Image (spheres, rainbow, N blue to C red):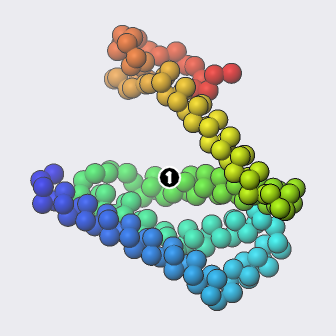
Amino acid sequence: MNEDKATRYNRLKRRVTVVSLIATVGLLVALLATGWSLALRDAARSNVLAYVALFSIVNEAVGLPLAFYGGFLLERRYGLSNETFARWLLDQAKSFGIGLALGGGAAWLIYSCIRFSPERWWAIAGVLFALVIVAIGKRCAAGCSRWRTGLVHGRSVRTNGDSPTKPRKRTPLWPA
């Protein structure tokens, strides 16, 4: 990719990112200003997990066209991806599911802390989130440093000093 093409690609990616941010902020303002947030709450019957699911669906519907342009069309136009539309859509669905699970879990945790201690919920939630982040970080660091893998001739091999032709034994990423 020559410099002119790379510059154009990065400029378009930045524009998509900025427009996506503006669209998300616009969605949040519209939800609050028009009362749609209350309609979502009523539709969810005041269940925090259902509200997170409904809000996530609305947010995904607003952001999907920009994600399609920035993550599929633009990448293919500049020869940076050969992913099919079906595979891209599957990746988007996986990303949505993971975001829904994490967002729903976080919202549930915060509301549980509010029910447990209405005066100090913020401190309890902060400590719990810090512990979760540290635990995930330690697990990821241990897993990543212990098992770096590569692909040689279509086979998964260990790349941390072993022979590149020796197949890696199937071992779990997360030690028991």
- Say above or below: 21 vs 162: below
Give the camera-side residue of 164 and 148.
Answer: 148
Query: Is the residue 71 above or below the residue 141 in the image?
Result: below
Q: Residue at x 83, y 62 (%)?
A: 119
Quarter of the rendering containing residue 40: bottom right
135 left or right, relative to 65: right
Q: Nearer the viewer, residue 20 or 80?
A: 20
Total numbered labels: 1
Residue projecting furthest to the bottom: 34
Question: What percent of the width, then of the height, locates residue 146?
Answer: 50, 21
Q: Residue at x 64, y 89 (%)?
A: 34
170 lies left or right of 165: right
> Is residue 111 visible to us here?
yes
Side (left or right) of 163 relative to 143: left
Q: Which residue is mark 1?
A: 91
Name the residue: 72% across, 46% down: 128
Kind of residue at disc 1: Asp
**Percent x, y for residue 140?**
55, 33
Q: Is residue 92 above or below residue 138?
A: below
Q: What residue do we see at 59% from left, 31% from top?
A: 138
| Quarter-of-image position of residue 21 | bottom left
| Quarter the C terminus occupies | top right
Name the foreground residue: 54 vs 117: 117
